[in-house]
Image (cartoon, helix red, strand yellow):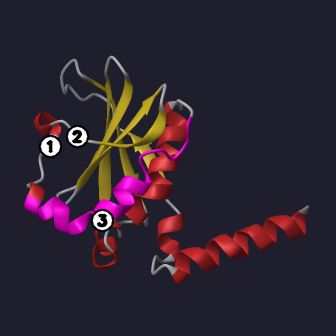
Amino acid sequence: MFSAFVVCFLVASFSVNASGYTTELLEYEITAVDNLNLGKSVAKVWNLTYSEGGKSVTVIKRNTSEGAVYVVNSDFFEVCYASTTKGFGTRTMKKSWSKVPFQINDVVINSDEVKKQQIITPEKVDDKKALGLIASYLPVLLNEQYTHLLN
C-alpha cells in the first residue's frame, strides 16, 4: 500500500514538473474571508495562496438558480467555475462579474485549457471539494509564462 502511494506521488510530481509547473503550486492554502458586505449575490469568499508569502487569488462563491458559481480572480486574470447538476468545471463568466479587461485575461488564460476543464467531474460538488479542485486545476489554466502570477 505504501509503495503504491509513493509511486503515485512520484508520477504526479514528475508530470507536474514535466509540464513546466513547479512543485510550489502543488501546495496551497485556502482561508475564508469573513465580515465582508459584498451584497446578496455573494455567499462566501476565500483567498487561495500557493506559496507562503505569495500572491493570493480570490474565490467568490455566488449562488444561482443552476447551482454554485465560483469566480476566481486576481489583478491579471479571472475564471469562472460552476457546480451544477451537470457537474463541476469552467463556465462562461457574466460580464457584470468581470473586473479584468478581456484583453489582459485572454493573454494570461489558456483558452484551450479552459475548454478541457468544462467538465472536471460529472457530479455536483460541495465547497470543500470545489475549492480543492480549483486549487489543483487553476495553475494549468494559466499560460506557462504567467504561472508566476500565482507565486
The residue shown at (47%, 68%) is 25
- CA distance separating discs 3 and 1: 17 Å
Of 27 and 89, which appears nearest the observer?
89
Q: Residue furthest right?
A: 1
Residue 19's x, y, as percent?
Answer: 49, 78
* Figure quadrant of the C terminus: bottom left
Q: Are marks 1 and 2 in contact (CB under 8 Å)?
A: yes
First along the sequence among labels 3 and 1: 1
Circle 2 sits in a helix, a strand or a loop, which is it? Answer: loop
The residue shown at (52%, 47%) is 132
Of 133 and 74, which appears nearest the observer?
133
Residue at which label 3 appears: 110
| Horizontal side of residue 30 vs 90, given as left or right | right
112 within the magenta span? yes
Say which amino acid is labelled 2: Met
* Figure quadrant of the N terminus: bottom right
First along the sequence among labels 2 and 3: 2
Q: Are marks 3 and 1 in contact (CB under 8 Å)?
A: no
Of 37 and 101, which appears nearest the observer?
101
Q: Are marks 2 and 3 in contact (CB under 8 Å)?
A: no
Residue at which label 1 appears: 98
